Amino acid sequence: MPSGSADISSILDRILDAATDNLRIAKILIQMGLDPNNVTYDAIFNRLLEIFVSNITLANLFAAVGAGFFVATLLMRTMVPLRVANMIGCALFTVFGALSANVATFLLYLLLLPINALRLRQMLKLVKKARHAAEGDMSIEWLKPFMTERKYRRGDTLFKLGDPAKEMLLTVTGKFLVKEINVEIGPGALMGELGFLTPDNRRTGTIQCIEDGQVLTITYDRLLEIYFQDPQFGYYFLVLTSQRLLQNIDRLQKQLAAERAATTNRIA
């Protein structure tokens, strides 16, 4: 044995000799199956190794691997891999509960499996729909499960230019008017998404209901939560809102060109 290792071992042995003078420690050592009058580093190591080897069972192996997956979930920053790792951990602990005849453990992790599977399916569906939106499908039907219903009557003002913006809206029925640019909005249109991206979260226009209708709303806090749960979804959402912004710019440019043409014709 190298001299350095021998020195460390002798130091540990002296520390253990001093510790065994304490009655509480002596009781603990007896419970561990060690002789308080003859405690050495090697004796403790061998005893721990003996305990470890004697407890190696198929059930405990499943539990150990499952614990590893649960620890891994604490290190993950995105939701999809976290859910996958959590499901694997739950499956392994379910097997552990079955092999060890631990009914409580078996039922707990068996019930957690479908819950994680459902959440994983929702997130994957959300990312898939967002990808389709980025590829040209401007519908945001995929957000409906996360939205709440609200109804408006003709003459109601949904929000005004410069108002604090806290939610995004999706029209379901009825008609709405953007007063600043005199543009009507029908069913299936998105409203208030730009307020989510402005630095001070302010409304960029005034929306008024011109025909009784229904909208679905989602708060910016909820949208932000979904955004950060999966960076890929966040990217596609930004692409979607960018396309909306470009559409608005194109519409305003066409209106401006038409007004200029009308002015030129009147002068001529």
Image (tube, rainbow, N blue to C red):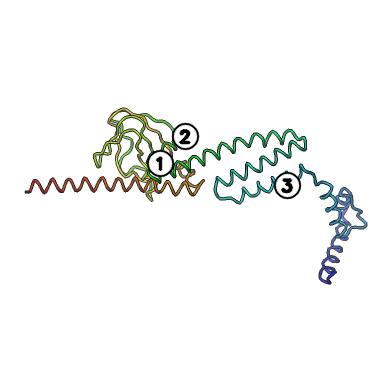
Mark before the other along the chain sequence, 2 or 1: 2
Q: Residues within 10 Å of mark 1 (few under 14, many from 20)?
A: some
Label 3 residue SS:
helix
Q: Residue at x 40, y 43 (%)?
A: 133
44 left or right of 146 in image: right
Disc tally is 3
- Where in the figure is residue 94, as x and y percent of width and height? 70, 38
Mark whose residue sits in front, 2 or 1: 2
Cα distance in 3D space between marks 1 and 3: 46 Å
Please state which amino acid type lies under the numbered disc 3: Ala
- Where in the figure is residue 51, as x and y percent of width and height? 84, 49
**26 or 35, which lies in front?**
35
Q: Which residue is mark 1?
A: 166
Label 1 residue SS:
loop
Q: Which residue is mark 2?
A: 145
- Where in the figure is residue 75, as x and y percent of width and height? 61, 51
Q: Residues within 10 Å of mark 2 (few under 14, many from 20)?
A: few
**142 or 162, which lies in front?**
142
